[in-house]
Amino acid sequence: MLNTIYLKISKIYKEKQKIIINYSAFMLLTGICLISLTNKNDDNNKLLLFFNNLGFNLLSVAIVGILLGFKDWRNYFQDRLSDIVLGKSYIKNLSKEQLINLQNDTIKAYFETDSVEREGSFLNYFHQEIRSLIGAPFRENINLIINVAHNEQDNIVHFNETIIYECREVGGIIQDSVRWVPRPDEFHKIENLLIVIKCPTKYKNKCNSNCSTCGEEIVLFDSSKESEKCLEKAVSVPLDAYKNIDGLFVKILSNYQVNVNKHITWQMAHPTKGISLVIRYPETYVMAHDIFGMTREKLNIIDSKGLFNLTYNDWILPYNGVVYQLIKKGS
């Protein structure tokens, strides 16, 4: 896009070069004439002063125009224009508002229409809801492994769940906390929750006082050491001491009970690249599922007796994910 702009400017400049020189020569002669005719020591004659000043202004503009018409000067300014436009160095000096306007102008030029920026357009939605995610920390290679057991004497399904992922930095920081948020009435009972992290060994002695254990798991939250009511609401553990650790490993282990035939939702809390969901369940059940916010053509799903495996290697935005349900056969 910038290359095209530069070429167009260069072409226009070459086409108008002779016109510029001709006008400059005309202004030069006019300026000299005005200065000569009004060069009288009469400070009280405002009309003479006006035309005298006009003559000097025309003379100045004419000299600049003629200089720009010379090849060496033209090449100089073309080189500077090339450095600015093609090198894109000017972008770093623009304000956020100017950058957004430039982005909008580029998109309108690309699609050859101004209507993409109208009120209620997707472009406006992008700026309001999506653009900030580009500069936000994200998660990578998130794995959810669930083992399901069922007691035939009740209508409760027991879940043993492990979530593992890497925190990735943007702008030098990772996500600010680890959160585990059950949806209202989703679980029959939450039995326990454990949140641990592990620093990559390359960051040894670079994060906080616990870095002597780099490469080993550090427990951030253990429900067995908290009050009985600690799991009645969302659990959030800050990562302030590890905010600069790109690739920080997070593991969340939980055990909970769910009523038979209950829907379970797995939603992304942050922009996420690459997920894997593995559910092992009794063969007396069948697995139903649906996805939201993912391209079906990029999904890889294995659904056999007692095993469900979903993998997706592309990006998923916050609040998108998977909803699944174990349905007892014959129910």
Image: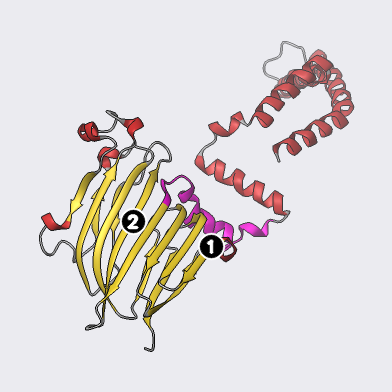
- Label 1 or label 2, whichever comes before in sequence order: 2
Q: Identify the residue at horizontal 66%, vertical 60% (top origin).
A: 115
The circle on residue 213 is none
What's the amino acid at mark 1? Asn
Q: Position of residue 174 (x, y in %)?
A: 36, 42
Q: Position of residue 315 (x, y in %)?
A: 51, 54
Residue 212 drawn in magenta: no
Q: Nearer the viewer, residue 239 or 18?
A: 239
Q: Nearer the viewer, residue 233 or 69?
A: 233
Distance between the alpha carbons at the discs numbered 1 and 2? 19 Å
Work out whether 11 lies above or below 121: above
Q: Nearer the viewer, residue 2 or 175?
A: 175
The circle on residue 300 is 1
Give the magenta-colored segment's residue range. Answer: 114-141
Residue 140 drawn in magenta: yes
Q: Is residue 300 left or right of residue 321?
A: right
Q: Local crowd at mark 2 within 10 Å, few (<14), some, or many (≥20)?
A: some
Work out whether 131 lies above or below 214: below
Q: Position of residue 231 (x, y in %)?
A: 19, 63
The answer, for residue 59, to whether it is visible in the render is no
Q: Is residue 164 left or right of residue 231?
A: right
Answer with the quarter of the image where residue 331 lies: bottom left
Q: Identify the residue at horizontal 51%, vertical 38% (top origin).
A: 95
